[in-house]
Amino acid sequence: MSYRYPVSMPSLRGNELEYTSKAVTDGWISSQGPYVPQFEEAFAAYNNVKHGVACSSGTTALTLALRALGVGPGDEVIVPEFTMIASAWAVTYTGATPVFVDCADDLNIDVAKIEEKITPRTKVIMPVHVYGRQCDMEPILELAYEYNLRVVEDSAEAHGVRPTGDIAAFSLFANKIITSGEGGICLTNDPHLARQMAHLRGMAFTRDHSFLHKKLAYNFRMTNLQAAVALAQTERLDEILAARAQIEKRYDEGLRGIKGITLMPPRDVLWMYDLRAERRDELMAHLAENGIETRLFFKPMSRQPGYLDPVWPTLNANRFAEDGLYLPTHAELTEEDQDYIVRHVRQFYGE
């Protein structure tokens, strides 16, 4: 179905066309082109972090981060129940086991429940900044210190939230705050980890390119074309975040007080405007009939066939999954667009 008001779309109003055209004109379209290191340096500098390692997706970013930290078979990684499944899959790709922790009422991992899930096999805690809400990182970092663990932040939905863990992994998919179409990037202050992630993303070639590969690695490279778009997007990140902050404010004002709608806590940066709704599925159908796309909340990881655990119906994450959705959220959304969307939400609830 084609929607007049899609749930997301990229904002490509900067130097994206100029940079990609130059990449094509110059013939540098592979991962060896100059825009890749330029993007890595610009995004790292924006986040006050020393090193950036660009790659092919947010999922591969998480996989590289875990592999660089030595995660593998026999290890465990603490992962939130409420997240997109890529968080858990990245752990599984390494041969390790994801251990799930339920969410708090802000949808982020419930910090108070992490310690009880730590075992001698635990190697990493992976907090996810859901929908742009930063996790409470101080106690997570303290737990990591006490138990000698590492912290990989899944920042796929949180461009603009500065990293505090060992590695932060960002997605650059077309629906994210900034995009390269497909892509991702890892940020770290540790030069050894940065080198290791770069090594792993490029098939672990030796320096002499002799075609002897001493470890299992990946072709997770970002192309120069993708990096050209990502660099142009990074140049506009403050502008895009400011536009999204205004969108959050207008939704808050327009939806406040509707009987049947529960607004969610504020976001540190706005990826998607999430809310809870009575008769959610009927509301979504009503909005779809009027050209407005919406999306469901994530389902608990313990409800996923690959990780099925019979406890899933009792989880806080499942309670939110039952009535949560998010509305169109992107920097190209106008005030008139939001007025139309809010009007149809109010109409559904008879207001």
Image (cartoon, rainbow, N blue to C red):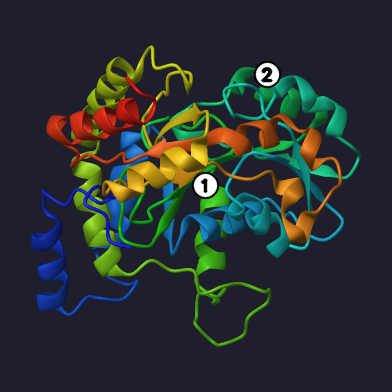
Label of residue 239 in the image: none
| Residue assigned mark 2 | 139
Residue 151 percent coordinates (x, y)? 65, 37
Q: Residue furthest right?
A: 120
Element on which disc 2 rests: helix
Front: mark 1 or 2: 2
* Closer to the camera in the image, 150 or 87: 87
Q: Tell whether label 2 touches label 1 (CB within 8 Å).
A: no
Q: Residue at 62%, 50% (x, y): give it.
A: 87
Question: Considering depth in this image, is 149 or 295 the residue closer to the camera?
Answer: 295
Report the amino acid beneath label 1: Pro
> In the figure, 73 relative to 25: above or below?
above
Question: How many numbered discs?
Answer: 2
N-terminal of the pair, mark 1 or mark 2, is 2
Q: What type is the residue that disc 2 sits on?
A: Pro
Residue under the point 61% across and 72% down: 217
From the viewer's perspective, is residue 118 above or below residue 55? above
Q: Which residue is mark 1?
A: 191
